[in-house]
Image (cartoon, rainbow, N blue to C red):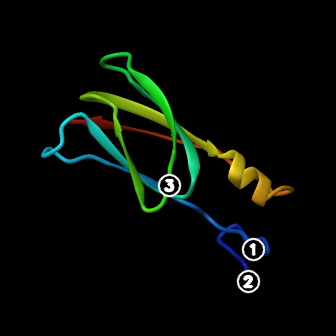
Amino acid sequence: MRGVTNLPGGDIEYITAGTDSATPGVTRFTGTPYAVHWRNLSTGANGSVIVEWPSVEVHTGPGIVVATATPSEVMLAAWSGLTLLPGAGGWVVP
């Protein structure tokens, strides 16, 4: 089986950051068990969380939030020898 990278077993994993005006100041991370390191640029608040199935909610506070996602220790142990690339993104939390 070839993934989108055209390498045997290649795969792309996703983490989604979702917000809802019904729960202001909260971001819900859904996806692969990566470690997410976030910072609210509007307030200076920051933190880290491991994304767990099906999702995890974090009180990021309202404002502009940026984050990076890196492989967790669990992923590194399970997939040793593979190249796992970090990702990054930004969004506005109501």
First-in-chain label (1 vs 3): 1
- Under mark 1, the amino acid is Gly
Which labelled disc corresponds to residue 9?
Answer: 1
Q: Amino acid at mark 2?
A: Met
- SS class, disc 1: loop
The C terminus appears in which quarter of the rendering? Answer: top left
Residue farthest to the top?
44
Residue that protrudes farthest toward the right in the picture: 81
Q: Are marks 1 and 2 in contact (CB under 8 Å)?
A: yes
Position of residue 68 relative to residue 42, above or below, is below
Q: Position of residue 57 (x, y in %)?
A: 35, 45
Please give left or right for residue 41 compared with residue 69 in the image.
left
**Corner quadrant of residue 11:** bottom right
Work out whether mark 1 precedes mark 2 in sequence or the reverse, and give the earlier one: 2
Residue 55 position, x and y percent, is 41, 56
Tag shown at residue 1: 2
Q: In this rendering, does residue 84 appear at all?
A: no
